[in-house]
């Protein structure tokens, strides 16, 4: 049975970290093979799993042994494999599945970009344009349709999961309208409208994004009569008035985009309007290994950055917002409660 050894000495810890790519690749391989979906509730041999996922038994056993060292699957005393809490998150049917997040963070382009991190640190700019001769999203949609699909599914999965946490956290009692700015397909907005049956909502995002909204918001959907969908770019204009504005994970691309977006919100909102800004933080967070890694990936692909608490507060203050309480949404998301001054 594979067991986790005591905390290794610094030299071995560093060796394990150096081989971190092997762990990421193993997770990706398991996700692409569908190993977690093939493994049911009973202990199963590598041979049985290999048949189910159409792989060679011996290499699959080596993959499972590696993953078991990290608590992703576990090996029994008689050499069979069972699920762990982490391996179940690779199942497609798990409502909290991280399968597409796992695939997205290990897409082929990532293996080209990570070795150039020193270049990005020296220059302060993304390395993607130099690698592929075009911008990140242009490359995805023109040259890597499979990766673009993985990205869309990963973002949809992540948004759906965080939407429930956000709706549970926020108390919008007394508000009659809410606007989700740069809200993607509107999962957060839909969850809030379900929680508050009398509330009206507006979803604003790029035309190509809002063309495919959450089914609950579409014509004929249960929330459609209470929603206005506005195609637009929040960096250019926010033609929306509401009691509450939600801004989630869109202030991480570059400082100029952040500045324009926040100023546009303040310019559009009525005095006293509430603005809830939800972001990953690279400090004051129990998930810093995760958020700091995302921060570096943003540097590599688009030249963006995740915020510290102080960097985000300074940008909100510069835009004219009155910054109030900071609240924890979940281990990797924080919500800043702000108001537009009277």
Image: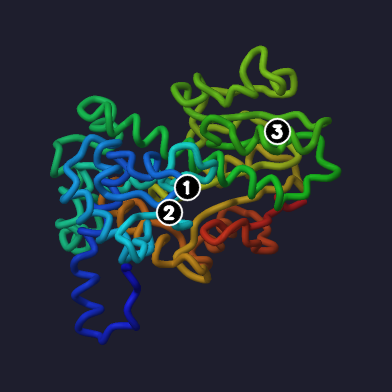
Badge 1: how crowded within 10 Å, few (<14), some, or many (20+)?
Answer: few
Residue 232 x, y percent position in the rendering: 51, 26
Q: Which residue is mark 3?
A: 241
| Image marks 2 and 1: residues in contact by CB distance under 8 Å | yes
Q: Which mark is residue 83?
A: 2
Q: Residue at x 74, y 18 (%)?
A: 225
Task: Identify the secondary structure beneath mark 3.
Answer: loop
Please report the residue visible at 57 percent of the width from the left and 56 percent of the height from the top: 316
Mark sitting earlier along the chain (2/1)? 1
28 shown above or below 179: below
Check the image and report above or below for 313 versus 27. Answer: below
Front in this rendered view, residue 135 or 284: 284
Residue 237 relative to residue 208: left or right: right
Which image quadrant for residue 84? bottom left
User: Where is residue 4 shown, x and y percent of the image?
Assistant: 34, 74
Mark in front: 3 vs 2: 2
Give the distance between the C-alpha atoms of the residues marked 3 and 2, in whole angstroms. 49 Å
Q: CA distance from mark 3 to mark 1?
A: 51 Å
Disc marking residue 41: 1
CA neighbours of label 2 inside 10 A, class few (<14), some (14 to 19), many (20+): many
* Residue 14 left/right relative to 76: left
């Amino acid at each position: 049975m594979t067991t986790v050894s005591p905390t290794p000495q610094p030299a071995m810890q560093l060796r394990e970290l150096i081989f971190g790519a092997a762990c990421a690749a193993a997770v990706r391989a398991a996700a692409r093979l569908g190993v977690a979906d093939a493994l049911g509730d009973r202990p199963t041999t590598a041979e049985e799993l290999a048949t189910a996922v159409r792989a060679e038994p011996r290499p699959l056993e080596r993959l499972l042994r590696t993953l078991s060292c990290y608590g992703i699957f576990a090996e029994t005393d008689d050499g069979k494999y069972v699920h762990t809490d982490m391996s179940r998150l690779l199942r497609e049917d798990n409502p909290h599945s991280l399968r597409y997040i796992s695939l997205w963070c290990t897409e082929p382009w990532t293996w080209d970009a990570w070795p150039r991190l020193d270049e990005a640190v020296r220059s302060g700019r993304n390395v993607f344009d130099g690698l592929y001769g075009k911008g990140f999203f242009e490359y995805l949609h023109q040259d890597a349709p499979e990766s673009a699909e993985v990205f869309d599914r990963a973002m949809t999965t992540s948004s759906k999961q965080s939407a429930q946490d956000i709706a549970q956290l926020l108390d919008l009692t007394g508000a009659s309208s809410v606007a989700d700015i740069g809200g993607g397909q509107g999962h957060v907005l839909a969850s809030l409208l379900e929680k508050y049956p009398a509330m009206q909502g507006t979803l604003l995002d790029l035309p190509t994004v809002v063309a495919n909204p959450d089914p609950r918001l579409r014509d004929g959907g249960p929330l459609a009569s209470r929603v206005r969908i506005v195609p637009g770019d929040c960096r250019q204009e926010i033609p929306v008035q509401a009691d509450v504005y939600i801004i989630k994970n869109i202030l991480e691309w570059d400082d100029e985009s952040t500045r324009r977006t926040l100023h546009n919100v303040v310019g559009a909102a009525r005095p006293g309007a509430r603005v809830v800004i939800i972001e990953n933080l690279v400090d004051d967070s129990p998930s810093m290994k995760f958020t700091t890694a995302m921060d570096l990936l943003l540097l590599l692909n688009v030249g963006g950055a995740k915020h510290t608490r102080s960097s985000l507060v300074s940008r909100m203050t510069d835009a004219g917002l009155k910054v109030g309480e900071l609240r924890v949404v979940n281990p990797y998301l924080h919500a800043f409660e702000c108001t537009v001054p009277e």
